[in-house]
Amino acid sequence: MGDQGKILKVRKNSQGDITDVMLNDGNVYSITDAIELAKDHKIEGVNVGKAKNGQEYLRSNPNDKSSDNLDRLETF
């Protein structure tokens, strides 16, 4: 990707956890790959958090809108 991508849709497992993301260029990435892309600043509007157990996760950058939270995005 030349410019930063933007997450448009997410895929969730039966527990509601995000497993894959679709970027605005149509490419689909596993959440693990998306975390690495975010660390490399290749996805806009997200950052990588770390849970108490040490597991990394993807989260939306804080703002005043809830509509762009990853859990609220359209699924595919």
Image (cartoon, rainbow, N blue to C red):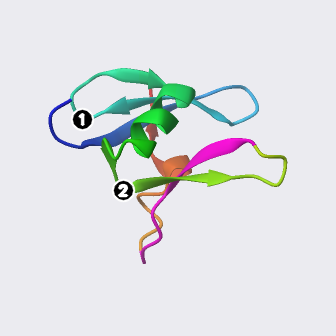
The disc label shown at residue 24, or none: 1
Q: What amino acid type should be assigned to the residue bearing mark 1? A: Asn
The magenta stretch spans which residues? 55-64
Q: Which badge, 2 or 1, comes first in the chain's sequence?
A: 1
Can you identify the residue that label 2 sits on? 45
Give the image location of residue 75, x and y in percent. Answer: 47, 33
**Which residue does the image show at 38% across and 21% down from the upper left?**
28
- Asked if the residue at tag 1 contacts the one at tag 2, i.e. Cβ–Cβ closer than 8 Å, the answer is no
In the image, taking residue 3 as reference, residue 28 lies left or right, namely right
Location of residue 27 (image quadrant): top left
Q: With respect to residue 3, does 20 lie above or below?
A: above
**Which residue does the image show at 73% across and 26% down from the upper left?**
14
Identify the image quadrant of the N terminus. top left
**Which residue does the image show at 47% across and 34% down from the upper left?**
36
How would you rate the neighbour count of disc 1 (Cα within 10 Å): few for under 14, some for 14-19, many for 20 or more? Answer: few
Q: What amino acid type should be assigned to the residue bearing mark 2? A: Gly
In the image, taking residue 10 as reference, residue 45 lies left or right, namely left
The disc label shown at residue 39, or none: none
Identify the image quadrant of the C terminus. top left
Give the image location of residue 8, x and y in percent. Answer: 34, 40
Q: CA distance from mark 2 to mark 1?
A: 13 Å
